[in-house]
Amino acid sequence: MNQPHAPTDRPLDAPGAGSTDSSPRRRTGLVLRAALGGVLAALAGLAAGSVAAALLGTRQTPVVAIGSAFIDRVPPWLKDLAISLFGVHDKTALRAGILIVLLALAAVGGLLAVRRYWAGAAVVVVLAGIAVLAAATRPDSGQTGFVPSLVAGLAALLLLRLFSRRLAGLRTDPDDGVSRRGFLQLSAGVTLGTIAIGALGKVVGGRRAAVAEAREGLSLPLPPSTDPPAGVQAPGAAPWVTPNDEFYRIDTALSVPLIMPSDWRLRIHGLVGRELELTFDDLLERPVVHQWVTLTCVSNEVGGDLVGNALWSGVLLKDLLAEARPAGNADAILSTSKDGFTAGTPLSTLLDDRQSMLAFAMNGQPLPLEHGFPVRIVVPGLYGYVSATKWLTDIEVSRFDRFEAYWTPRGWSELGPIKLSSRIDVPRSKAPAGQVTVAGVAWDQHVGVSRVEVRVDGGAWQEATLAADPSTDTWRQWHWSWNATRGNHVLQVRAFDAQGNPQVEAQAPPAPNGSTGLHSVDVNVG
Ligand SMILES: Nc1nc2c(c(=O)[nH]1)N[C@H]1C(S)=C(S)[C@@H](COP(=O)(O)O)O[C@H]1N2
Ligand SMILES: [Mo]
């Protein structure tokens, strides 16, 4: 290549004088390429992070995660200043600002990586680490909110490595045409890949947005009120109604299945006199019930929070099954979701006096996408894994001896009635000396809780005050006033069912059919 500066032109006192890459223009070329490599690696990482976010159905892309954490932490005056400067566009400005800072730092990372890969990698690790932490600590990010930032960081690290390898060749020999071409090819490939991945993210994100929009636009037969019934809340206990965005989420779906209500079909078939196929509108034409039901996950540990209470609106399965006319030898349904999850539920629990339903609304809102939009099953009294199929598409009336549902071959019981349980919500670790409210919840769905007792340091059991419950299908709150003395104490709770049977005290893990044992809390009174 044409080289205007003879090696002797360079100032002898320049830093790095004597090394092979010290011609100013060559250095500039290398510096620009290195910075570009860092920027492209970062952009590709961000694109991969956006796709991961779209697939997981989380809003926590790396930039959003950092932005939200930033908003939570900036002093109010700066927030006000930003709002007055950028007006309604303050969020866009913040995003653009974060992106610019990230890319500038990525350019620095690219520069560092040419000499020492680990130094450039450290920049990426710190940036991705901040995003992962920011996403993981967001209250609204769910369990997978940190994944996009992790994906972005790993992708950027990998590409930074590839770029720095190519540039290492140019560092030792600026005229190395193979390295030059290699860098060019890599840059072009990464750019194209980033564009393709970005487009994929847009498609997936667009589909989610379309379903979310269809959900917003639905007009459903909703309950006249979602206020809890009178007297159900005990002082200090968890809110009796679990808000939708705080409701626990458990499923095997890596990305939330996206179903347009207009595309939804439910087939009820198998051992039936008449096969049914319903559209969403067909479902809404039938009589609708609104029922408070507490859902519980079989994986809930003693004292755990995989339990939530909501007002569900839907159509009784009893009514639909009456139309389909199950055969006399049928004893179960196998329900299937859009993503292939299956649950086996005793037919008897759908036909008896309980309000087992195909639910389309939760707390007066169309089902959230994560909770099974547009239709799921809710069966009072059964753990979710044997009943509460989300994104429901198929119900086969059958017999337990003819199928194995999703969790059965994985070591969980075929049948999953919820076990009588109780939990202390307050206090959880510390309390002041004197009168302390001990409060919590107890549940035995579709059986009912008749009594709750508390004891301190293994002493005599004391009866707690029960709050009201609208039916046996919800959890029941309780509270007890404790005259706490200084020191460390152990609180324990136990519940009794409607027939007066006490809770099982023997400790058992969640597998294969639900945990047992009493919830104990160590409290430091000071
Ligand atoms: N499609 C589908 N539905 C599912 C599951 C699943 O993995 N996939 N998990 C079940 C389990 S184990 C539970 S506890 C409940 C949880 O419902 P939630 O996420 O709305 O709280 O959904 C049930 N329905
Ligand atoms: Mo579950």
Image (tube, rainbow, N blue to C red):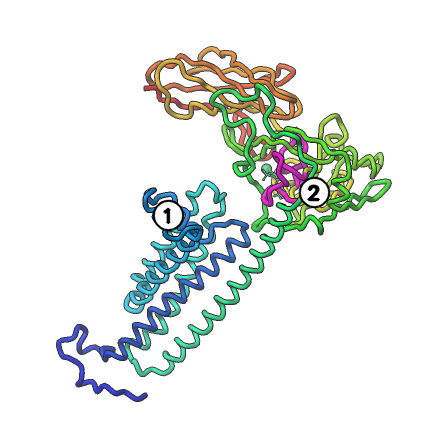
Indicate whether 485 appears above or below 71.
above
Q: CA distance from mark 2 to mark 1?
A: 48 Å
Which residue is outermost to the right?
273
Magenta stretch encompasses residue 428: no
Query: Circle 1: is it few (<14), some (14-19), or many (20+) Cα within 10 Å?
Result: some
> Where residue 354 sits in the image (x, y, percent)?
72, 27
**Identity of the amino acid at label 1?**
Phe
Circle 2 SS class: loop
Q: Nearer the viewer, residue 461 or 426?
A: 426
Q: Quadrant of the C terminus?
A: top left
The N terminus - image quarter: bottom left
Magenta includes 379?
A: yes
Farthest residue, direction bottom: 2
| Mark 2 Cα-neighbour bin, 10 Å: few <14, some 14–19, many ≥20 | some
Depth order, front residue of 47/307: 47
Quarter of the rendered structure image containing ligand 2: top right
Q: Which residue is mark 1?
A: 70
Q: Which residue is mark 2?
A: 404
- Amino acid type at circle 2 is Glu
Residue 348 appears in which quarter of the rendering? top right
Looking at the image, is mark 2 or mark 1 earlier in the sequence?
1
Ligand 1 has an atom within 8 Å of the beta carbon of the residue at disc 2: no
* Magenta region: 360-389
Residue 299 appears in the picture as rendered: yes
Q: Looking at the image, how many numbered discs can be counted on the residues?
A: 2
Checking the image for residue 176, the label placed there is none
Q: Residue at x 40, y 23 (%)?
A: 522
Give residue 191's position: percent from left, percent from top.
Answer: 46, 70
Q: Residue 149: image x %, image y %?
A: 43, 53
Q: Secondary structure at mark 1?
A: helix
For the point 59% across and 20% down, which residue is it? 230
Q: Position of residue 422 (x, y in %)?
A: 54, 23
